[in-house]
Amino acid sequence: MKKKSVFVLLFVILLFVNPLISFGQISEQIISGLKAGDAKTVASHFNENIELVVIDKELVCSQAQGEQILKDFFARNKPIDFKITHQGGDDSSYAIGKMQTGNGNFRIYLTLKSKGGKSQIVQLRIDKD
């Protein structure tokens, strides 16, 4: 009887903890897209309109325009590595990461919101580190 109650208790705890662990996590596809300099993969996670800040240029653009701007950035700054340094969030999730390129290091800020059960990037900011 004691083993059964311990099992049930562990099961209930796992049910509540698992969503908390995965909440605020950035998709592995986004991370690998940034690491590889793959604008198409990253842009596939863009909201239909995205706030994009690349160094000193700030604009709100469509998903297709955002992909082209990101593609141009990657052409000038080929990524060597990308790592998430911090992530979290409550109503929306966010991540801060460092990108190493052949032309220096950049800090990447992502803000995502859930839309239709899928996290979409609503803001992408790239600053010189």
Image (cartoon, grey):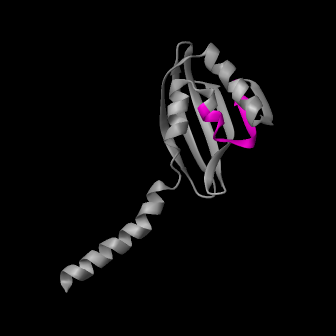
| Residue 54 visible at all | no
Magenta stretch encompasses residue 50 = yes
Where 11 falls versus 18 (above or below)? below
Decide if residue 60 is on the left or right side of residue 84.
right
Q: Which residues are magenta?
A: 41-55
Count of numbered circles on the image = 0
Q: Position of residue 2 (x, y in %)?
A: 19, 83
In this rendered view, identify the residue nearer to me: 7 or 86. 7
Q: Position of residue 76 (x, y in %)?
A: 63, 14
Where 95 falls versus 92 (above or below)? above
Kindly report the secondary structure that dominates the magenta region of the rendered protein.
strand
Decide if residue 18 is on the left or right side of residue 79.
left
Where 109 falls versus 92 (above or below)? above
In the image as oriented, which residue stretches furthest toward the bottom?
A: 1
Magenta stretch encompasses residue 80 = no
* Quadrant in which the N terminus is drawn: bottom left
Q: Quadrant of residue 39?
A: top right
* Quadrant in which the C terminus is drawn: top right
Q: Position of residue 87 (x, y in %)?
A: 52, 45
Q: Tell me what residue is drawn at x 58 percent, y 26 percent.
A: 38
| Residue 58 visible at all | yes
Q: Tell me what residue is drawn at x 52 percent, y 44 percent.
A: 27
In this rendered view, identify the residue nearer to me: 51 or 55. 51
Q: Tell me what residue is drawn at x 73 percent, y 33 percent.
A: 52
Where 19 falls versus 36 (above or below)? below
Q: Quadrant of residue 12?
A: bottom left
In this rendered view, identify the residue nearer to me: 33 or 57. 33
Q: Position of residue 96 (x, y in %)?
A: 55, 38
Decide if residue 128 is on the left or right side of residue 88.
right
